[in-house]
Image (cartoon, helix red, strand yellow):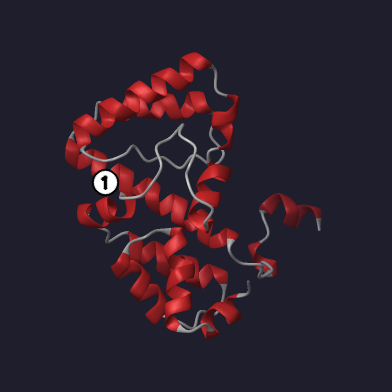
Amino acid sequence: MLVARFDRLPADEAAGVVRVWADVPRWIAAIVAGRPYSSVDALAARATELAAGWSEEDLDAALAHHPRIGERPAGSGADARHSRREQAAMAHAGADVAERLRAGNAEYERRFGRVFLIRAAGRAAEEMLAELERRLTNDPETEWREAAGQLAQIALLRLRGAFDDPAPPDARTPALAEEA
């Protein structure tokens, strides 16, 4: 989709698109109300700015239906498709790592009262396990803030993945700019 098309969607349809990125009602409403956006970068900047204000309640609401790391997400909707793709590394996890993730997830939920959330895209199962074990040592305040940061990373990756807009010429990476 192009940003210009997103800008023209009826509000309820635009909210449905944004909800897949992160199901935080205030954030969704603010992003939809902020249309039009001049570019994906402008939309991402606004989404990032708004995510910085997420509360612990916003995090809990967004995680209400979020799958556990290592469990196959149920359903056929866009959110489940994203989760399956993001957790693709789990398909290659050994039995020991999978069992330690299962046990760690259970301990995390007992300790913090919510599912463990991590940006899984681009991470190996072993890295996610190490992060889970590290984060189990966090105090509750530190942990909810870290989890909210992970949710924001996931939302921004999903946001950027939803658009086909070409990157402006000045957005090229330095290595690519040197080759041009």
**Which of the image's four quarters has the N terminus?**
bottom right
28 to the left or right of 145: right
Nearer to the camera, 180 or 131: 131
Q: Position of residue 167 (x, y in %)?
A: 66, 66
Task: Point out the residue furthest to the top here.
Answer: 96
Whether residue 126 is situated above or below residue 37 in the rendered picture:
above
Asked where in the image residue 31 lies, by quadrant, the reply is bottom left
Task: Point out the residue furthest to the front here.
Answer: 75
**Which of the image's four quarters has the C terminus?**
bottom right
Disc 1 packing (10 Å; few <14; some 14–19; many ≥20):
some
Amino acid beneath label 1: Arg
121 to the left or right of 65: right
Whether residue 51 is situated above or below residue 42 in the rendered picture:
above
Q: Position of residue 36 (x, y in %)?
A: 49, 83
Task: Point out the residue furthest to the right here.
Answer: 180
Count of labels shown? 1
Whether residue 76 is situated above or below residue 159 in the rendered picture:
above
Nearer to the camera, 6 or 10: 10
Nearer to the camera, 176 or 40: 40
Q: Secondary structure at mark 1?
A: helix
Q: Looking at the image, which residue is at 41% across and 77% down?
A: 32
Q: Looking at the image, which residue is at 63% across and 74% down?
A: 2
45 to the left or right of 168: left
Q: Which residue is mark 1?
A: 145
Asked where in the image residue 38 lies, by quadrant, the reply is bottom right
Q: Position of residue 124 (x, y in %)?
A: 54, 29
Q: Looking at the image, which residue is at 26% across and 57% down?
A: 58
Q: Position of residue 107 (x, y in %)?
A: 26, 25
Whether residue 107 is situated above or below residue 171 in the rendered picture:
above
Q: Looking at the image, which residue is at 53% across and 57% down?
A: 78
